[in-house]
Amino acid sequence: MSNTPTPWYASADGNGGEHIQSAAINEDNYVARVDAMGEQGFANADLIVKAVNSHDALVAAWEAMRDSGMFDWEGAVAYKEEAALVMAALEQVKQ
């Protein structure tokens, strides 16, 4: 399975909705359409775009934190809850 290349962006579709598109594919095609129910639809489309565009960087950052051993040193005891959140997020996104 291959992913649609990023970056993605949102644009009005002219019919009261938002198209979410990839900069790497023909602009006549789109990845998804979000029905715009007032401003909420546009906000939802923007949130989807932000999440997709930041996904790879966030996963890389979480993996770097895990792999660096930054949670393994003695002083890291103070950051156990934060470390658990990072590791849970990493596991969730890798499913």
Image: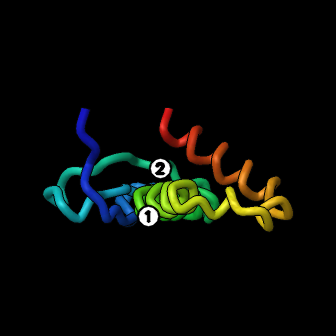
Tell me, for residue 81, which label it has, or none.
none
Query: Where residue 2 appears, x then y in whole percent?
Result: 24, 39
Look at mark 2 in the image and give the residue it sits on: 34
User: Can you name the residue that lies furthest to the left here?
Assistant: 26
The residue located at (48%, 39%) in the rendering is 94
Give left or right: position of 47 versus 7: right
Which of the colour schemes (rainbow, by chain, secondary structure, one colour) is used?
rainbow
The residue located at (41%, 57%) in the rendering is 56
The residue located at (82%, 54%) in the rendering is 81
Tell me, for residue 57, which label it has, or none.
1
Nearer to us: label 2 or label 1: 1
Nearer to the camera, 76 or 61: 76
Instruction: Looking at the image, tell me whether mark 2 or mark 1 is earlier in sequence order.
Output: 2
User: Can you name the residue that lies furthest to the front here?
Assistant: 74
> Where, by quadrant of the figure, is residue 38 drawn?
bottom right
Nearer to the camera, 39 or 51: 51
Nearer to the camera, 16 or 34: 34
Give left or right: position of 74 versus 49: right
The residue located at (68%, 59%) in the rendering is 71
Query: Where residue 44 appears, x then y in whole percent?
Result: 57, 57
Residue 35 appears in view: yes
Q: Amino acid at mark 1?
A: Ala
Q: Amino acid at mark 2?
A: Val
> What is the secondary structure assignment of the residue under circle 2?
strand
Give left or right: position of 67 versus 28: right
> What is the secondary structure assignment of the residue under circle 1?
helix
Query: Where residue 70 appears, x then y in whole percent?
Result: 63, 64
Residue 51 appears in view: no
Crowding at dot 1, Cα within 10 Å, few <14 / some 14-19 / many 20+, comes out as few
Q: CA distance from mark 2 to mark 1?
A: 25 Å
Query: Where residue 86 appears, x then y in whole percent?
Result: 66, 53
> Where, by quadrant of the figure, is residue 43 drawn?
bottom right
